[in-house]
Every structure is written in structure tokens, then in C-alpha cells.
Amino acid sequence: MMRRVFVLLLFFSAVSVYAQKFEGLALTPPMGWNSWNHFGCAVNEALIMETADAMVESGMKDAGYLYVNIDDCWHGERDSLGFIHPHPGHFPSGMKALADYVHSRGLKLGLYSDAGWKTCAGRPGSRGYEYQDAMQYAKWGIDYLKYDWCGTEGLNARGAYLTMRDALYKAGRPIVFSICEWGNDNPWEWGADIGHLWRISGDIAPIFDGEEGHGSWSSWGVLQILDMRKGVRKYAGPDHWNDFDMMEVGNGMSTDEDRAHFSLWCMMASPLIAGNDLRIMSQTTLEILTNREAIAVNQDSPGIQGFKCYQKDHWEIWAKPLKDGNLALCFLNRGLNSVTVKIDWTEQVVKDDQFGHQYPFSEQVYSIRDLWAKQDIGTTEKAFKAKINSHDVILLRLEKK
Ligand code: GAL
């Protein structure tokens, strides 16, 4: 008996010292901003400071946005000892000073690197420098690392991400670890012990329904990413999320499309990382990004990813089980024409076999709230009828009466 206890103790202490990510950093999907979708390589310290200011002053911080993430191209060179430094012209005050500034605004700072020799934009990658890079990030006060997968020929994905996870842990500063491997090697199967979120797709583009070709690769529309991976929802949950990519809200789609995109990312419990220019966004963009009731659906504590529960012609219903037996429903019109939807609740049962939830509307009455109209609109005792514009949604919250 004593021996078994001893062996168990040894096992658990070994696990906690050697094989660990920083637990509990993303109990709900991370919220923040990332430079890539709007700015690409045009990043510098003024942009990051102004973005942090805008996040606070616009009310986004109060709505839950926390991370200000610099994507590719912040890098300068490695020094003679191998330590990486930011580009001296674009980040003249250095990363520590920038992190201090972002922290002084009550926000957190994220950086980007890559498991290969070079990042996707050809900057120095972390391969062979994992522990040094992790030490440097910890010293600077970095809070979030997105770790990309370019230039990794010959590397094993799980192994490469494991190395960086261990390097971050060893460096001692809690850092959210964002696996950006595009889903090629099924990161949902191994990512939960390694990172806090993993991309399930190639890059998003500001298109609702379509694909943008770039020669050897494509970027994807909102619907394409929504549909891309069947069967991954069971892998998502608190501290380990399917990442549907950074958002394109405010980057050129129509208002209806932006609202639908945001609602779907909320329904899928995807990280909510804005990708627009926060300094000059319109009131409409801000209202979409800060819809607190939609955000509450995304941040709901059991962290259950939504699923499609009904489909008819060009429209469908997505369901997301919420805490206390409540439910979010998103009516999505994929078509190019508006559609009138009608649901007689008492004839419907929403069933989530994966997570074991059932919503028998004939036995249990729910109140209904329209989260974009911001209105209570009755109960499930009465049939629901509504018109939905092309590429738009209706987002409802149903609560047990
Ligand atoms: C891609 C990644 C994008 C962006 C870009 C930077 O691989 O999916 O989100 O980080 O690299 O070069």
C-alpha cells in the first residue's frame, strides 16, 4: 500500500514538474486583438500603444477584451548569444517597455513566433532557440504566445509544440500558448495538454462565403472555416479551445456579415480576437464587437462548443448548451436572398448527444431573448417567425422558466 502511494506521489510530482502547460489561463475563450488581419507586417510600438489605448477607451476592455497581440514581423535579429530582439527601428523602446505600457492600461501583451527556422514572413523562427526565446519573452513580461508552423519540414508537430510548452513552463512566467498549426496534424487530438487553443484552419479572409487563392495556398471565408472540421467540437472546453482564427469584423464585410461572423464565433466558443483597426473603427463595428449578451454566450462557463441542429434549404440553426440548462440558438441564413424562418418549438427537440443535453420544448417552457434586438420576445409556447437577411443571423438566448 505504502509503496503504491509512493509510486503515485512520484508520478504526480514528475508530471507537475516536467510535463505541464500553465493550467487555468484560458478557462473561457481568450479575448483580445491581433495585428495580422489588418496590418500584416506593418507593426510598430506606436500602433500597439495606440491600440491598447483604443481598447480601453472604446469600452472593449470593459466588454472583456484583454490581450493585445503582435503577430509576425516584430522581430529584429538574434544577438551573438542567440537572444532575439525586436526590430530596432519599429520597436525602439524595446519589448519590456512596451509590455509595461500595455500592462499599465490593465491589458496583456502577446507575441508571435514559429516552430520552424523562419516565420511565415521570413523572420527568425524559434527552432533550436526555444528555451532562449521563452526566457526572453518571460523577461519582457509577455503574456501570450502564438506559435506558427511555417518552415517546419521534417518536424513532428506534437513534438515541436511540446518543446515550446516545456520551454515556456521552465521560463516560469504564465503565458497563454496558442497553437497555430492550421489543423494539418489534428492538433485537437493532442493540443489540450500542450496549449490553450489551436487553430483548426488555414488563414481567414474578410469574405463571408468563399476562398481567396494565393498560388500554393488559400485563405478562407467565414462559412468555409465554420464547416471545415467535422467532429472537433468534443475536443474543446475550458483551457483548450478550437480556434476558428482571428476575426475579420470591421475589415470590409457587410454589417450583416460581420454580425453573423461574430455570432458564429460566439456560438463555437472560439477565441474572440479582433483583427481590425481599433483606433478608427465605426460605431457599428464597435457595437458588434462589444455585444455583451453575445459575448456571454461565448464566455459561458461550461465552455461547450455549438453545433448545427437543424437545416432547411439555405438556412440552419446552430445550438450551444449554456450553464443552468439554458441554450443559445443561432439562425443562420447562408443564402443570397432573405428568408422567413418559422419554428413551432413544441414540435422540436434540440439534443446534444455529445455532451448529454436535451431541450424538450413540449415539456419545458423557455423564455426567449433576441441578443441583437436586445429584447425579450416571448416564450417557446408560441411559434417563432422571423425574417433573416442574406448572410445574417438571429441570435437567441433561451432560459428555463
Ligand atoms: C500564418 C498564420 C496567420 C499569420 C501569418 C503571419 O501562418 O496562420 O494567422 O500569423 O502566418 O505570417
Image (tube, rainbow, N blue to C red):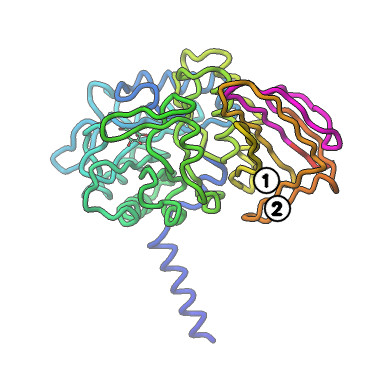
Mark 2 residue crowding within 10 angstroms, few (<14) / some (14–19) / many (20+): some
Q: Residue 332 at x, y = what percent? A: 62, 31
| Any part of residue 104 in sight | no
The answer to whether the residues at label 2 and label 1 have Cβ atoms under 8 Å apart is yes
For this rendering, which residue is in front, 391 or 10? 391
The answer to whether 329 is drawn above or below residue 10 in the figure is above
To which residue does mark 1 refer?
Answer: 321
Q: Quadrant of the N terminus?
A: bottom right
| Any part of residue 177 in sight | yes
The answer for how far apart the CA atoms under marks 2 and 1 are is 7 Å
Q: Residue 86 at x, y = what percent? A: 26, 30
Image point (32%, 29%), residue name: 213
The answer to if 392 sits in the magenta stretch is yes
Q: Residue furthest front?
A: 313
Q: Quadrant of the C terminus?
A: top right
Question: In terms of image quadrants, where is residue 20?
Answer: bottom left
Amino acid type, mark 1:
Pro
The answer to whether 266 is drawn above or below residue 208 in the figure is below
The answer to if 323 sits in the magenta stretch is no
Which segment did they paint magenta? 371-397
To which residue does mark 2 refer?
Answer: 357
Mark 1 residue crowding within 10 angstroms, few (<14) / some (14–19) / many (20+): many
Image point (56%, 49%), residue name: 238
Question: In terms of image quadrants, where is residue 114?
Answer: top left
Q: Residue 230 at x, y = what percent? A: 50, 48
For this rendering, which residue is in front, 401 or 308? 308
Looking at the rendering, the quadrant in which ligand 1 lies is top left
Q: Residue 206 at x, y = what percent? A: 44, 24
Amino acid type, mark 2:
His
